[in-house]
Amino acid sequence: MSGVLLRSFMGRARAMTIHLYDTNRQKIGRVVKPFAFFFPSAEVFSGDTRIGAVEKLWTFFLPRLRVVDAQGQTRFTLKRRFIRREFTVVDASGREVGLIAKKWGGGLKEIFTDADSFGVEFSDPSLTEDDRALLLASTFFIDALFFEGK
């Protein structure tokens, strides 16, 4: 099935792979989201090594996501704020260590295009490279789940 048909009929449930490149156009990783109607998730790879995953949790009201490391241990919980476009990043000890926010693109851009801009803020300087990669991958996952096609 072509990408356009998958996007049209399967929407957020469709499988996808996002390849990540550095500024020198060297492939540095990928995000792999399998097909899922319920409880979607995505695995995150640095090169060919799995460094973790991001999973949508079941919640009654405001969405939450869990970010786990390669061993399946929870590293972060992403909590959507009442402001629809923001997710706070909370570490396993309960400290807020960052923010993922969809930036307002302006009325015309928001209405007539599917382009989105996000900001990822790390307020804890002790986050590892893998932590930062997992949070960057979470940003793409958030876009695919909550903002694509809107």
Image (tube, rainbow, N blue to C red):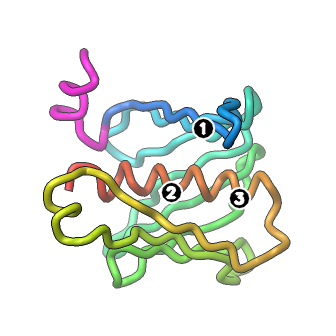
* Element class at badge 3: helix
**Residue type marked 1:** Leu
**Which portion, as a residue range, is magenta?**
1-13
Image location (x, y in percent) of residue 148: 29, 51
**Residue type marked 3:** Arg
Bin the neighbour count of mark 2 within 10 Å (Cα to Cα): few under 14, some 14-19, many 20 and up. many
**Residue type marked 2:** Thr
* Element class at badge 1: strand
Query: Which residue is rendered at x = 18% and y = 71% of the image?
Result: 107
Q: Which residue is mark 1?
A: 20
In this view, the mark in front (1 or 3): 1
Of 136 and 70, nearer the camera is: 136
Query: Which residue is rendered at x = 54% and y = 77% of the image?
Result: 88
* Element class at badge 2: helix
Q: Is residue 102 left or right of residue 138?
A: left
Q: Which residue is mark 2?
A: 139
Of 56 and 97, nearer the camera is: 97
Image location (x, y in percent) of residue 69: 73, 50
Query: Which residue is rendered at x = 40% and y = 48% of the image?
Result: 39
Image location (x, y in percent) of residue 25: 65, 32
**Is residue 77 in the magenta section?**
no
Q: Quadrant of the image for the N terminus?
A: top left
On screen, residue 15 above or below 127: above
Q: Quadrant of the image for the C terminus?
A: bottom left
Q: Which residue is mark 3?
A: 132
Bin the neighbour count of mark 3 within 10 Å (Cα to Cα): few under 14, some 14-19, many 20 and up. some
Q: Could you tell which of marks 1 and 2 lies nearer the N-terminus?
A: 1
Residues marked 1 and 3 touching at CB (< 8 Å)? no
**Is residue 6 in the magenta section?**
yes
Q: Could you tell which of marks 1 and 3 lies nearer the N-terminus?
A: 1
Q: Quadrant of residue 15?
A: top left
Mark 2 to mark 3 CA distance (whole Å)? 11 Å
